Amino acid sequence: MLRIRGSFSAENCVKAVETKLKEFGIITEKHIVACVTDGASMMVKFGKIMSCENHLCYAHAIHLAVCDVLYNKQIDLGENIVEIEDKSHEEEDNDESEELIEDLDKALDLEFESGVGTDASFHITYAEKIL
């Protein structure tokens, strides 16, 4: 374990990790195949400097994306009100359904400022009760 207090550059992080591993007889160029880090810019740069492969942790990326949606992303649905009218089964119109889906796509447009990419698909289905 290597305790770091305060800010730390990627170059200094590489030196500190290599020094700590050498204490155990581990040489990064010879013994380390890959490292896994979170998506922080310093850690991404750390992975590029290291002599091994670097992989970003998928679990951490998913966690950041979920936090962005739940806590950081404010969705204003005030301008994107979707009205659903009563329709009988005989009057079903596919164009109106497509417009509804397009309106919902605009309302649920997810863009993340933190650089985390996501690809989401929403499937919208509804049923009508026929009396």
Image (tube, helix red, strand yellow):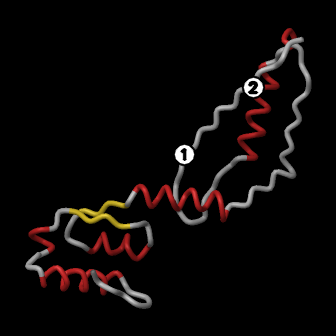
Q: Is residue 131 left or right of residue 3?
A: right
Q: Is residue 30 left or right of residue 107?
A: left
Q: Position of residue 75 (x, y in %)?
A: 75, 56
Q: Position of residue 102 (x, y in %)?
A: 74, 36
So how many labels did they put on this image? 2
- Tell me the SS state at disc 1: loop
* Residue 14 to residue 48: above or below: below
Q: Position of residue 17 (x, y in %)?
A: 24, 81
Q: Name the quadrant containing residue 105.
A: top right
Q: Is residue 16 left or right of residue 8?
A: left
* Residue 100 to residue 116: above or below: above
Residue at image position (37%, 61%) is 56
Residue at image position (86%, 13%) is 130
Label drawn at residue 43: none
Q: Residue furthest bottom?
A: 6
Q: Residue furthest top?
A: 90
Q: Quadrant of the C terminus?
A: top right
**How far apart are the two marked residues, 2 and 1, measured between alpha carbons?**
23 Å
Q: Quadrant of the N terminus?
A: bottom left
- Identified by mark 2, the residue type is Tyr
* Residue 85 to residue 50: above or below: above
Name the residue carrying label 1: 119
Q: Position of residue 26 (x, y in %)?
A: 11, 75
Tell which circle, 2 or 1, labels the residue nearer the N-terminal end: 1
Mark 1, residues whose alpha carbon is within 10 Å: few (<14), some, or many (≥20)?
few
Q: Name the quadrant containing residue 100.
A: top right
Name the residue carrying label 2: 126
Residue at image position (60%, 60%) is 112
- Identified by mark 1, the residue type is Asp
Mark 2, residues whose alpha carbon is within 10 Å: few (<14), some, or many (≥20)?
few
Select label 2 or label 1 by which is in front: 2
Q: Name the quadrant containing residue 59.
A: bottom left
